[in-house]
Image (cartoon, coloured by chain):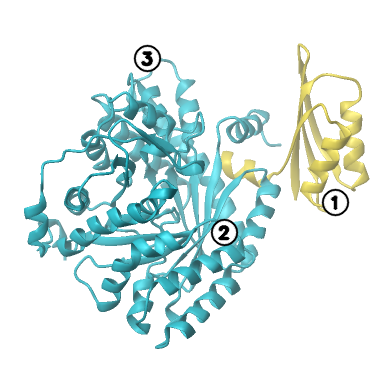
Amino acid sequence: MINMNDIMETITMIQEENLDIRTITMGISLLDCCDSDIDRSCQKVYDKIYRCAKDLVKTGEDIEKKYGIPIVNKRISVTPIAMLTGASGGDPVKYAKTLDRAAKDVGVNFIGGYSALVQKGFSPGDQALIQSIPRALAETDFVCSSVNVGSTKTGINMDAVKLMGTAVREAAELTKDRQCIGAAKLVVFCNAPEDNPFMAGAFHGPGEPDCVINVGVSGPGVVRSALSKMPSDADLTEIADKIKKTAFKITRVGQLVGTEASQRLGVPFGIIDLSLAPTPAVGDSVAHILEEIGLEQCGAHGTTAALAMLNDAVKKGGVMASSNVGGLSGAFIPVSEDAGMINAARNGVLSIEKLEAMTAVCSVGLDMIIIPGDTTAAVISAIIADEAAIGMVNSKTTAVRVIPAVGLEEGEELDFGGLLGNGPVMKVNTKSPAKMIDRGGRIPAPLQSLKN
Amino acid sequence: MKAVITVIGKDMVGILAKVSGTCADVNANVVEVTQSILEDYFAMIMLIDIQKMTCDLDELKQALAQNVPSMQIHVMHEDIFNSMHRI
């Protein structure tokens, strides 16, 4: 029989430590929906999404009941819409509205893929899409957008970086009466993964199959609780080992749920993304793990080292547990979604500069950071360029999701509610990088790219 | 196919009877029971065979919650424990 302690451990993880399946994300290729007429194209997009995903939410709920584990979100990612815009022409916002309608009709809570991949340059479709992003995010509820502006292989497209600084600002301005939510649904990537199930950066890459199920597992609370039970003189090798073992268990649940969902839906299973994704709920914080390791508060010196160890141990445990680990897999550090980070930012212990250092060793980048409403587009572009450079040189994914809080100043607070959380407006260095951003062009690919 | 029922809460008369009775009603065979009482605290883990069960796990859980309302009850398919704790 299954060991009694094991059973109690699993139940405690779910009931008290917030272990959950954060998302089941269905990736759907829309390449076969291209049409030279945008309205026909939109109709095909709607039909395909509805056909593939109509049972997604119900299946997720059935699996929840069978295993007694919450599956918090059911979502959809689609082929970057810039590709369809390239074929059909017309106003890309029509696609955004189609995606929004499809998402609402199948009952998912986010749909990602209003995206363009422009790491080396633009096609006409890419440019049209990027310019339409602020409007698309303002006029829809569930659509998420992402743009890949650089990669280790290609370098950084600085023209795109410049456009994205403006897009982030406009996305916030157009939604200023709704907590600037537009900017919270927009991610700027370097080295974007094509199979990431987590929003707002999920899209279904062109190299992916027609339809696929990806699963995102989470569990910062479980890791923190496991560490809190260790003796205070345990050395860091033991701590890393504990994190690894815990990550293993969490990933196995993801593997189970992913396999079951793919069987029930008759869709191939893609990857598990084992990411410690915090929520504002008490006990579900990545910052608190770092504090459990031994920092007075997240943001103190030592935070980067602790996070590097955490991120690596999570990956090692995950890789052992499943042969299909992909996506971002590691630790997320979204400020407004993490109770511990919010506190650290409020106290001024956590600064954007420290967060930038942390992004060199975590799985994503500057995430859900609220910046003053008067931050210029050039400064936002420069923040994006810095992050992209870290990603490019370290051959890792980095991203920027900053929210200019229109009308608010440093120290004031913005509250999104729900999973997106709340947080203080953080201080940004306002010295102007405008001349560099205006130069445009491309930062050439680094030597690391020449691996062949 | 098996499932695990866990029942936790303040001890009282007839918990085991009510839980196993509910299982019998839906044709779920009790395979193994482990139970312990620590001070006034009752904890029971029951392994049941659900191959020939006449309802699904969620319905069983709801029936149990109705019959033993004062206890905390979980009904979960055994696969979640097997995948988490066995390689």
- Quarter where residue A156 is shown: bottom left
Q: Secondary structure at mark 2?
A: loop
Towards the viewer: B32 or A225: A225
The chain letter corresponding to cyan is A
Indicate the amino acid at tag 1.
Met
Identify the hue of chain B: yellow
Q: Residue A114: horizontal and vertical position, in percent?
A: 39, 66
Q: Relative to B19, is A259 above or below?
A: below
- Work out whether disc 3 and disc 1 sit on a shared chain: no
Residue B30 visible at all:
yes
Q: Which residue is mark 2?
A: A108
Marker disc for residue A21: none
Q: Secondary structure at mark 1?
A: loop
Q: Residue A239: horizontal and vertical position, in percent?
A: 38, 26
Q: Residue A278: horizontal and vertical position, in percent?
A: 45, 38
Marker disc for residue A233: 3
Indicate the amino acid at tag 2.
Val
Tell me the chain of label 2.
A
Going 21% across and 52% down the picture, which residue do you hit?
A377
- Quarter where residue A103 is shown: bottom right
Marker disc for residue B53: 1
In the rendered view, does A408 fall on the left or right side of A386? right
Towards the viewer: A379 or A251: A379
In the rendered view, does A134 fall on the left or right side of A264? left
Badge 1 crowding class, 10 Å Cα cut-off, few under 14, some 14 to 19, many 20 or more, is some
In the rendered view, does A71 fall on the left or right side of A27? right
How far apart marks 2 and 3 lie (CA) works out to: 46 Å
Mark 2 or mark 1, whichever is nearer to me: 2
Badge 3 crowding class, 10 Å Cα cut-off, few under 14, some 14 to 19, many 20 or more, is few
Callout 2 touching callout 3 (CB < 8 Å): no
Callout 3 touching callout 1 (CB < 8 Å): no
Q: Earlier in the sequence, mark 2 or mark 3?
A: 2
